[in-house]
Image: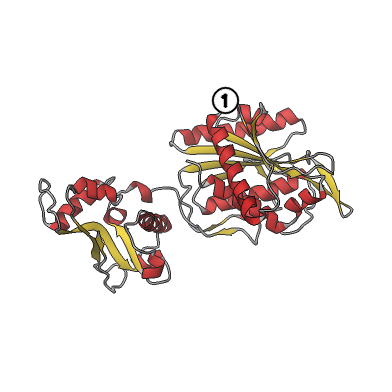
Amino acid sequence: MVIPLILSLKPQATVDHVKHIAQTGDGIYAVLRKYGLDKANCNLQYFYKINDIRDDKSLIKDQVYSLPILIYTYDGSSIRSTIGDNNMPLALSIQEYNDDMVTKGLKNKPYQSNKELWVPHSFLECDYPSISKPVLTEGKFPIFGPKYANIEPQDGKLADWVFYIVGGHGGPDPGAMAEIDGKTVSEDEYAYDIALRLTRNLIAHGATSYLITRDPNDGIRDEAILECDEDEYCYPKEKIPLKQIDRLRQRSRAINALYSKYKKQGKKQLAICIHIDSRSDDKRVDMFFYHHANSSKGKEVAQTLHATVKAKYDYYNPWRGYDGDVSSRDLFMLRETHPTTVYVELGNIQNPKDQDRFTMVSNRQAVADWFTDGLLKVK
C-alpha cells in the first residue's frame, strides 16, 4: 500500500518520499524489487538511511517505511522544469518509471493528472542504467525536410534498439512504375517517403535508426504525386549501382558493418525493407510480409506487424476485411543481411484503390504509424 505525501516545493528543494506499509512476509529486497528499485545498490543504502535501520533488520508488519522514491509536485510544464534538471534522457526515464508504476497499480494516477511525480533516488544520485540509455534529445534532422526536421522525443521505449530502414530501389532504378492523372509515379519515391516517416517515428521513441536508402533533398513530402528523381544514394554516401545484385550487396554491406558495431554494445537490431508491388491493375493487394525461413525472430516480427495492421483495419474499416499474409522467402536481403530482417510489400502500384494507400498523405503516415505500433510490441 502506498501513502502519497505531497509537498508544494520548488524544484531541487527537499521533497518527501513515497511510503510503504510493510505486509506479512515483506523483505527489504522484495519491496525494492516490487518498485523497480533493486538494480541500483544505492537505493538499498538510501533505504537504510532514511528509515534509520541497520541492514540486518527485518521489516515490521504494519510499520510505515519511506521508499527511495522522491515525490515532486509536477509543475504542469515538464519533468525537467519540475526537478530543475534539463537532462532529457533523465526526464524520459522518469516518465517511463511513472508510467510503469501506474500500469502496475502501485501509483494511483499519472503524474499529469494528480501532479505527483515519482523520482527514484538512484536516477538522481547513482550511475543507474536506465538514465544512461542513448535516448534522443531534441534536435534537428535535415534528412526529413524543413517541415519535419525537428523531432521532439515521446519516450525512450525503443532506446535499446537499432533499426535499418530500407526504401526499395532508388538511384537509377525507380522500381515499379505507374501513371496517375497523366503523371508517372514510381515505387522508390513512395517507399522512401514512408521509410522517412517510419524512421522519424522510431527516433521519437528513442531508437537509433538508419535510413539506408537516402535522398539529399526530398525529405518528407505532403503531396499526392511525388516527382521521380535519381539522386538517391546508399548510406553513408555511396552511389547506387544500376545492376540489381550490386545494389543489394551494397545495402547489405552497409547494414552489416553497422550491425557488427552495435552487436558489441548488446543492442537489439532489426532491418525493415519497404517495397510496393506491381500486378495487373484490377488486382488489389493488401500489405504482406516476408521473412527468411531460417529466422524465427524474423517470422515473429513479421507476424507482429501483420497482426497490428489487421487490427487497425478491423478497427477503422471493419466492413472491408484484410487479406495480407506472412510467408517465408529466400530473398537476398533476408538471407544476406545479418540483423533480423523483414520485407514489406505495401500494395499494387497499378491498382487505383491501392494507389490511395500511397498517394494520400494521411495514408502514408498511417502506414508508418501502424508499423511503429507493431515494432513497439516486439521484444
Please state the horizontal and vertical placement of residue 219, each as a whole percent of the image: 68, 54
Using the rendered image of the protein, determine whether residue 240 is visible from the camera's viewpoint.
yes
Badge 1, how many Cα within 10 Å: few under 14, some, many 20+?
A: few
Element under disc 1? loop
**From the image, which quarter does the N terminus lie in?**
bottom left
Q: Residue furthest bottom?
A: 8
Q: Nearer the viewer, residue 258 or 104?
A: 104
Q: To which quarter of the image does residue 277 belong?
A: top right
Q: Residue at x 27, y 61 (%)?
A: 70
Q: Residue at x 77, y 57 (%)?
A: 224
Please state the horizontal and vertical placement of residue 174, each as a whole percent of the image: 78, 41
Q: Is residue 208 left or right of residue 104?
A: right
Please state the horizontal and vertical placement of residue 64, each as a whole percent of the image: 16, 60
Report which residue position mark 1 lands on: 294
Q: Residue furthest right?
A: 182
Q: Nearer the viewer, residue 187 or 220?
A: 187
Against 306, residue 10 (above or below) is: below
